[in-house]
């Protein structure tokens, strides 16, 4: 029995070095035991470099050079972050089998491959949750202001997600403490130290109040979906989230009005749907048109890599509304609050939009609301994320999803809110002042109406001009609703 002693729980390089050496020496999976330093006293064992230093016996060596396929390496880098004790052995077993079955990774029904992909998916979801649910608390130390967060990820994703937090909070000195490893950013370099105790995280402060206010303001009882919410924000994370203190109360208040809705809460897209959507989001040609359901769109948007905006966004924000809506609204892109909530038009522009819809007599719940670009484009200024207008390349890349939404919903009328939406819907730059308030033909017997973006109405400085623009906006919404009826 060859006992391998890896340096750390996430020691991918060590695993790879040892696996390569063992495979060359024809050590079968059942004769290799994978341990991590610390368990070593129990089993003894050798480090990967000691194993690699031993030359392969000519009679044992395979003779040919074997390179693991990229599909395996991509999955393996995630699987090592899984908490299962089986992960290193599973990886070695699959690597071993790949020699004789080069296309093994494409056999989804194979139990080893299915388990490997299942582990990789769980790790991806843990990373996604960590990006969405880490909350910093302000502290002051000898160097001044800094931020600390405590988080317990479902898998060991803290190091892998660290670059995301650096990009997002480049101007903040921060530490993220987890039981596995602590991540530190000092405005110049990332550093990692051993895992911490929950007691090391400071308790509440002003940032918590901010989060509570923010969360209460975006919490819409009419859209409450308890199952989905708990799935997205599992209870294990609640104690790190200041806003979670509000959840029981908000749910209790909303219950009476939304019992029926909660019972009908849609389930998460199936694994098959997510897989198909992810494939589309990366590989399918523009003309592929393979996305056929709104669940696929939502899953695909969240995994989309068609442009770079996903890097700094919390999540992709797909549209929201019934699949048979006759009226489809297209905004520009999710803003700060939409990026966090995962829903379009829930922030200040959304409130203005809701007010105008109510005044125009348009029930938002009967319309489909989406954006031309599905990830939040912004730049960091201090701690604030400042909106940046998406460029034409980003709008073009994201039209894949808007086209899919339009193809699936087949609305009679598409309303472009603002110039970016105009570009996405009409395919050319559109002067809002000139074309607003009229119906324009679109392909597939649909019509387009172009009008102001609600955020524009918030910015008009002069009160009389603002009231005038708002009245025209309401008029345009009425026109669109009439055309759709
Ligand atoms: N602005 C938009 O264009 N879309 C949103 O979802 C929010 C703000």
Image: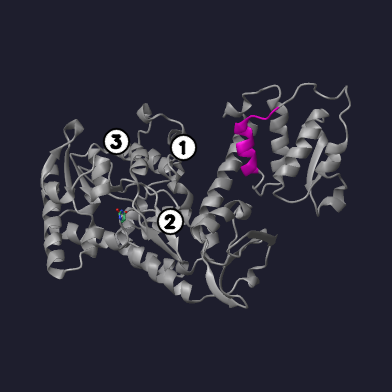
- Secondary structure category for the residue under label 2: helix
Task: Point out residue 18 in the picture as x, y percentages from the top left corner.
Answer: 78, 38
Query: Quick one: 430 or 425, which is closer to the camera?
Result: 430
Q: Establish whether ligand 1 lies closer than 8 Å to the Cβ of label 3.
A: no
Task: Using the rendered image of the protein, determine whether residue 330 is visible from the camera's viewpoint.
Answer: no
Task: Point out residue 213 in the picture as x, y percentages from the top left corner.
Answer: 39, 71
Which residue is found at the position 40% from the left and 56% from the top? 378
Which residue is found at the position 46% from the left and 70% from the top? 245
Which of the numbered marks, if any, corresponds to residue 408?
Answer: 3
In contact (CB < 8 Å): disc 1 and disc 3: no
Query: Quick one: 250 or 93, which is closer to the camera?
Result: 93
- Secondary structure category for the residue under label 3: helix
Query: Quick one: 184 or 280, which is closer to the camera?
Result: 184
Magenta span has 175? no
Q: Height in image: 319 above or below 384?
A: above
Where residue 145 sits, quadrant-wise, is bottom right
Task: Point out residue 189 in the picture as x, y percentages from the top left corner.
Answer: 62, 60
Which residue is found at the position 59% from the left and 42% from the top? 120
Of marks 3 and 2, the one in the foreground: 3
Spatial separation of the CA atoms under disc 3 and disc 2 = 25 Å
- Tell me which numbered mark, 1 or 3, is placed earlier along the sequence: 1
- Tell me which numbered mark, 2 or 1, is placed earlier along the sequence: 2
Question: What secondary structure prevails in the magenta region?
Answer: helix
| Quadrant housing the C terminus | top left
Query: How many residues crowd around disc 1 within 10 Å: few (fewer than 14), some, or many (20 or more)?
Result: many
Q: Is residue 437 left or right of residue 254?
A: left
- Tell me which numbered mark, 3 or 2, is placed earlier along the sequence: 2
Q: Which residue is mark 2?
A: 229
Which of the numbered marks, if any, corresponds to residue 367?
Answer: none
Question: What range of the chain is rendered magenta?
Answer: 67-79
């Amino acid at each position: 029995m060859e006992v391998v002693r890896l340096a750390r729980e996430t020691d991918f390089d060590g695993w790879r070095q040892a696996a390569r050496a063992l495979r060359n020496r024809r050590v079968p999976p059942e004769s290799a035991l994978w341990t991590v330093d610390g368990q070593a006293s129990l089993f003894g064992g050798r480090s990967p470099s000691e194993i690699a230093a031993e030359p392969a016996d000519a009679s044992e060596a395979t003779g040919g050079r074997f390179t693991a396929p990229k599909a395996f390496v991509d999955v393996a880098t995630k699987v090592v972050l899984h908490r299962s004790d089986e992960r290193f052995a599973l990886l070695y077993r699959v690597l071993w089998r790949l020699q004789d079955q080069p296309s093994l990774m494409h056999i989804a029904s194979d139990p080893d491959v299915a388990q490997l992909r299942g582990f990789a998916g769980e790790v991806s979801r843990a990373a996604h949750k960590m990006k969405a649910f880490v909350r910093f608390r302000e502290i002051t130390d000898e160097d001044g202001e800094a931020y600390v967060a405590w988080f317990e990820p479902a898998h060991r994703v803290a190091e892998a997600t660290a670059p995301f937090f650096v990009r997002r909070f480049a101007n903040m000195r921060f530490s993220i403490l987890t039981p596995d490893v602590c991540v530190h950013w000092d405005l110049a370099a990332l550093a990692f130290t051993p895992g911490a105790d929950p007691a090391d995280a400071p308790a509440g402060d002003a940032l918590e109040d901010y989060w509570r206010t923010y969360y209460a303001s975006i919490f819409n009882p009419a859209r409450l979906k308890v199952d989905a919410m708990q799935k997205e924000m599992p209870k294990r994370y609640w104690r790190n989230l200041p806003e979670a203190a509000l959840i029981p109360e908000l749910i209790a208040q909303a219950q009476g009005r939304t019992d029926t809705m909660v019972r009908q809460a849609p389930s998460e897209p199936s694994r098959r749907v997510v897989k198909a959507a992810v494939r589309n989001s990366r590989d399918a040609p523009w003309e592929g048109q393979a996305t056929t359901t709104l669940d696929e769109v939502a899953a695909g948007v969240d995994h989309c890599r068609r442009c770079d905006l996903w890097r700094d966004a919390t999540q992709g924000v797909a549209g929201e509304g019934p699949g048979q809506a006759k009226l489809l609204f297209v905004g520009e892109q999710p803003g700060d609050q939409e990026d966090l909530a995962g829903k379009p038009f829930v922030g200040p522009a959304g409130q203005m939009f809701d007010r105008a819809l109510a005044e125009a007599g348009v029930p938002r719940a009967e319309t489909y609301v989406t954006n031309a670009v599905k990830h939040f484009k912004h730049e960091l200024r201090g701690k604030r994320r400042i909106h940046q207008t998406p460029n034409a390349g980003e709008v073009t890349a994201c039209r894949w999803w808007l086209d899919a939404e339009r193809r699936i919903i087949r609305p009679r009328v598409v309303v472009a809110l603002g110039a970016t939406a105009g570009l996405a819907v009409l395919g050319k730059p559109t002067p809002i002042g000139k074309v607003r308030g009229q119906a324009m033909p679109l392909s597939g017997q649909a019509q387009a109406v172009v009008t102001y973006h609600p955020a524009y109405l918030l910015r008009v400085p002069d009160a009389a001009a603002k009231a005038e623009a708002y009245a025209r906006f309401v008029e345009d919404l009425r026109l669109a609703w009439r055309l759709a009826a």
